[in-house]
Amino acid sequence: MRNIALVASLSAVSLLAACSSGEKAAGTQEVNLYTARHYDSDQALYDRFTKETGIKINRIEGKPDELVARMKSEGANSPADLFIAADAGALWRAQEAGLFQPVESETLTARVPANLREPAGNWYGFTRRARVVAYDAAKVKPEEIDDYAKLATPRFKGKICVRSSDSVYNLSLVGALIEAWGPQKAADWTKGVVANMARPPEGGDRDQIRAVAAGVCEVAITNSYYYVRMATGDDAKDRDVTQKVKLGFPSLDGQGTHVNVSGGGVAKNAPNKANAIKLLEFFASADSQTHISANNGEYPASPDVPAPKPVDAYATFTAHPMSAAAFARRQPEAQSLMSAAGWR
């Protein structure tokens, strides 16, 4: 379905440049959104934004690296106004490619905590997701997985499931460990995790959680929202999985759980910059954060926005205060360490 959506979207984008000048001349307001978020619940936000502002959203969907490559190839003629992604690492890649322009917004500064936005204003997070541990409650005690460092100890020899090293979520986690511990200790951790793997990395985060329930492993590294969606969704088998498999929130140096962001930045050559900023501010609003959290299992970014049901049952953890920009820029180092450790 994603590929079909991408093909349809890429066909649509070829019309953007051709019709843009005509639509503007006719007084039509628009914003061209390049999005690496693929959640049906986001459509309700797009519809509400258009209803409230009169600004039409022309949406192009794709994987983060595909969209970054497209924007680079389009150059100064790119119709992209706003790029959003579900990971600070993906936002950093776009920033490193020179695809963002810094923006100043009192609304964004007020709505997005400093550690969840790029210091110069190149991108802003609007929701959070924690990189945590799903564990077999019959075999693992909560105190055995209350610290990321413990995952690399002999206790979990042959008992860990985790996805591949090219997962941007894993890269961001290891980037955070490098930022907190330095490269040597982080390298030792990656080697320990590889030594503890129950099987070679395969599948996505949900597959790791299901593998714990199936007895393939005792613990799995996963994003929190995957577990929340399984525990509260319509699939009875997945709900059964979460009766056996529980969610733990490890701490990094006693300061809290590693959290990542969904967020976005205004494109360097945005033809509709003002509308792009309006849309980004809309995503950061309390109503939008609540909607995304309730429907996708993520956590609001703003401290004054409480986690709604059903996410509130999994929101009683302390988030590490590390800057998302700090661990995002560590991705190349993280990839190098993981490759050297044999993390496939």
Image: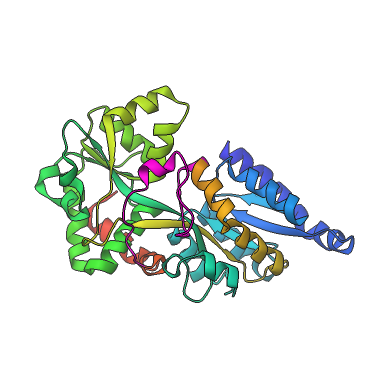
| Name of the residue lying farthest toward the left | 154
| Name of the residue lying farthest toward the top | 236
Residue 299 lies in magenta, yes or no?
A: yes
Tell me residue 233's x, y (percent).
46, 31
Q: Quadrant of the N terminus?
A: top right
* Residue at image location 27% in from the left, 28% down from the top: 244
Tell me residue 224's x, y (percent).
37, 45
Looking at the image, is 336 positioned above or below residue 57?
below
Quadrant housing residue 66: bottom right
Dominant secondary-structure state across the stretch colored magenta: loop
* Residue at image location 33% in from the left, 31% down from the top: 242
- Along the line of sight, the residue nearer the viewer: 129 or 159: 129
Tell me residue 211's x, y (percent).
29, 32
- Along the line of sight, the residue nearer the viewer: 164 or 146: 146
Let me know if residue 186 appears in the view.
yes
* Residue at image location 19% in from the left, 49% down from the top: 151
Quadrant housing residue 137: top left
Residue 198 lies in magenta, yes or no?
A: no
| Residue stretch rendered in magenta on the structure | 295-322
Let me know if residue 166 appears in the view.
no
All told, the count of numbered labels is 0
Looking at the image, is 273 positioned above or below residue 212?
below
Which color mode does the image show? rainbow
Tell me residue 252's x, y (percent).
24, 59
